[in-house]
Amino acid sequence: MATVRVQEALFDLAAETAALTAGRSDVGAVASFLGVCRADDGLSAMVLEHYPAMTERALRRIAAEAEARWPLTGCTVIHRVGRILAGEPIVLVLTASAHRAAALESCAFLIDWLKTRAPFWKCEEFADGERRWVAARAEDEAAAARWGGAGADAPARRREPERAAG
Amino acid sequence: MATVRVQEALFDLAAETAALTAGRSDVGAVASFLGVCRADDGLSAMVLEHYPAMTERALRRIAAEAEARWPLTGCTVIHRVGRILAGEPIVLVLTASAHRAAALESCAFLIDWLKTRAPFWKCEEFADGERRWVAARAEDEAAAARWGGAGADAPARRREPERAAG
Amino acid sequence: MRVLYFAWLRQKVGVAEEEAAPPADVRDVAGLIRWLAARSPGHAAAFADPRQVRAAVNQEFATPDTPVAPGDEVAFFPPVTGG
Amino acid sequence: MRVLYFAWLRQKVGVAEEEAAPPADVRDVAGLIRWLAARSPGHAAAFADPRQVRAAVNQEFATPDTPVAPGDEVAFFPPVTGG
């Protein structure tokens, strides 16, 4: 059963990693991905908006999809919302398995899918006062699409952006 | 410049991760792989032997190869030696980059190469007193081979095991 | 019907959510967008480029032909940018 | 020439390292293995299955035809199993 959380607070990487292995003797590999807020072009902070009723459900489905595809002993997805300063972490994905391939692949899968299937939106704040909504990137769609299949949130529909809600 | 260490002591995941991002504003992604000693079949501990004069050099080359292939902002490889109890960590690979693909791919590359190109040998200790040297796995060779190229330690030679030193 | 807006759609419409009672001939997401876009200049601006708009009906990603009915929660937002 | 043994090769030979002064006709790793294997039953056991033996000359992975010379450090070990 995956651990999924949407929160404003910082998270504790070491504690989350320890929780995945505590009391188990079958974990041979823990892969993690930590997304951090870069200070590109004078960016000072980001405000992460989400759709509370939908976001945690989407994350649970994405995590369940990973657990269905790989033999994981555990899986943790934590995504922050609210104001995040440059240099602070945004998202943590942790996957644990007996063997490294399952842990590494499922970790990459989860972050690729998160980027394109979970309802979060980033607004960048710059030192000069400018505010800018981040645009979705075609390469994120491509990265998610390489995993194929009918995924966490109807990707077949999302792959036709020219029709979506049009 | 990569951080490479071979040590008996446990390592501190949070401190090593923080060191990769401290004082930088260009890190957007940190991927990590943590290898843990499983307690399969009553295994109680492992003794990790290495070739001191060669091991650290091999790790430095593997890390340099990753830095040449991907635009990394940092890279850390720590491999423990000596007696490691079931449940304890064995190896840590951390890679940092502006974007996630470079971090995730280089992390997978490093652990695949470490498994097949770095001079470490594991001797398993079981609760019933049995001692058993771990045999190399063909799938580890295959995992390393998918990255191609002339690698850290003459993989072209290592791919012909029937001739090597025969 | 409850309609929610996120990110720059919320900013253009001017509210995060509103009640809507479209006529009976509004049967799907595409119809609802056409009807909402006529409500105010803000709505019109929010829906000006349909390629930039995504929708969810009752917290599930939706397409233009997804049915909508009284009592539904319909959300509009740009392509997601989390992670 | 300094010869090192690791893992089960060390256990079979019985020592972690030894000095060796092979005759001049031992010019490469393959020749050194043949010469060492004749030194003792332990050496013979260590080198009994050449497919399980890897070598390094002066801390670089080597092949059977890698040259060896006086002053070299030559190591023998099983396929690596770290990570």
Image (cartoon, coloured by chain):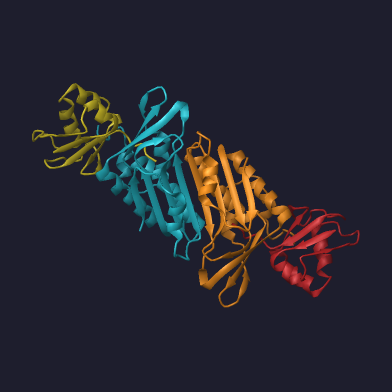
Chain colours: A cyan, B orange, C yellow, D red
Residue A137 percent coordinates (x, y):
40, 33
Q: Quarter holding the N terminus of chain B?
A: top right
Q: Residue at x 62, y 39 (%)?
A: B68
Question: Image check: C19 left or right of D22?
Answer: left
Question: Image check: A11 left or right of D11?
Answer: left
Q: Residue at x 77, y 57 (%)?
A: D64
Q: Quarter holding the C terminus of chain B?
A: bottom right
- Whether residue A48 appears in this view of the structure is yes
Residue A124 percent coordinates (x, y):
38, 30
- Asked if residue A88 is positioned above or below residue A77 in the image, the reply reads above
- Based on the displayed image, in which of its 4 quarters is residue D52 positioned? bottom right
Task: Give the mark count.
Answer: 0
Q: Residue at x 60, y 52 (%)?
A: B78
- Asked if residue B57 is positioned above or below residue B129 in the image, the reply reads above
- Whether residue A134 appears in this view of the structure is no
Residue B127 percent coordinates (x, y):
55, 75
Q: Residue D49 or C32: which is nearer the viewer?
A: C32
